[in-house]
């Protein structure tokens, strides 16, 4: 593990396009700002682990369970209806 020291408003760069900046330090908490391309997921560790658990659980679905999910149908998409403007005489 690489360990770096940074002050407030200082950054580290990972690769060519990920920048991590120390935004604030209060007591024993550090706030970080992370700038990364949209295609790179950035999660807190506990969130990442929860996503992995859910993915493992979903991959163990039985065929009968998958059929039930398929019966639910696609989610409804709400679209705004725009009416043409009419001029008042």
Image (tube, helix red, strand yellow):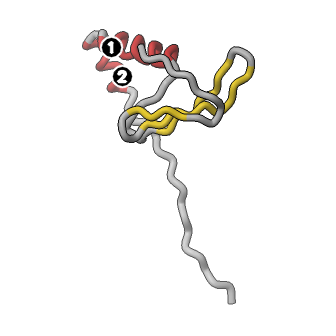
The answer to which quarter of the image holds residue 15 is top left
Q: Nearer the viewer, residue 29 or 72?
A: 29
Residue 28 relative to residue 35: left or right: right
Residue 16 image position (x, y, % from top left): 37, 40
Q: Which residue is mark 2?
A: 69
Is 87 rendered above or below residue 15?
Answer: below
Q: Nearer the viewer, residue 2 or 69?
A: 2
Q: Nearer the viewer, residue 6 or 25?
A: 6
The answer to which quarter of the image holds residue 58 is top left
Disc 2 secondary structure class = helix
**Proximity of marks 1 and 2: CB atoms separated by less than 8 Å:** yes
Residue 32 relative to residue 18: left or right: right
The dot on residue 49 is none
For this orientation, the residue located farthest to the bottom is 89
The image quadrant where one finds the N terminus is top left
Question: What's the residue at 73%, 22% (across, down)?
Answer: 26
Disc 1 secondary structure class = helix
The dot on residue 65 is 1
Residue 4 image position (x, y, % from top left): 51, 21
Residue 52 image position (x, y, % from top left): 39, 15
Residue 12 image position (x, y, % from top left): 49, 32
Question: What's the residue at 59%, 76% (across, down)?
Answer: 85
| Residue 33 visible in rendering | no
């Amino acid at each position: 593990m690489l360990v770096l020291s940074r002050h407030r408003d200082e950054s580290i760069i990972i690769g060519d396009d990920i920048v991590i900046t120390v935004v604030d330090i209060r007591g024993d908490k550090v706030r970080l700002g992370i700038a990364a391309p949209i295609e790179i997921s950035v999660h807190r560790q506990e969130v990442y682990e929860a996503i992995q658990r859910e993915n493992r659980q979903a991959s163990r679905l039985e065929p009968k369970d998958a059929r039930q999910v398929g019966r639910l149908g696609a989610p409804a998409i709400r679209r705004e209806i725009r009416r043409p403007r009419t001029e008042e005489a």
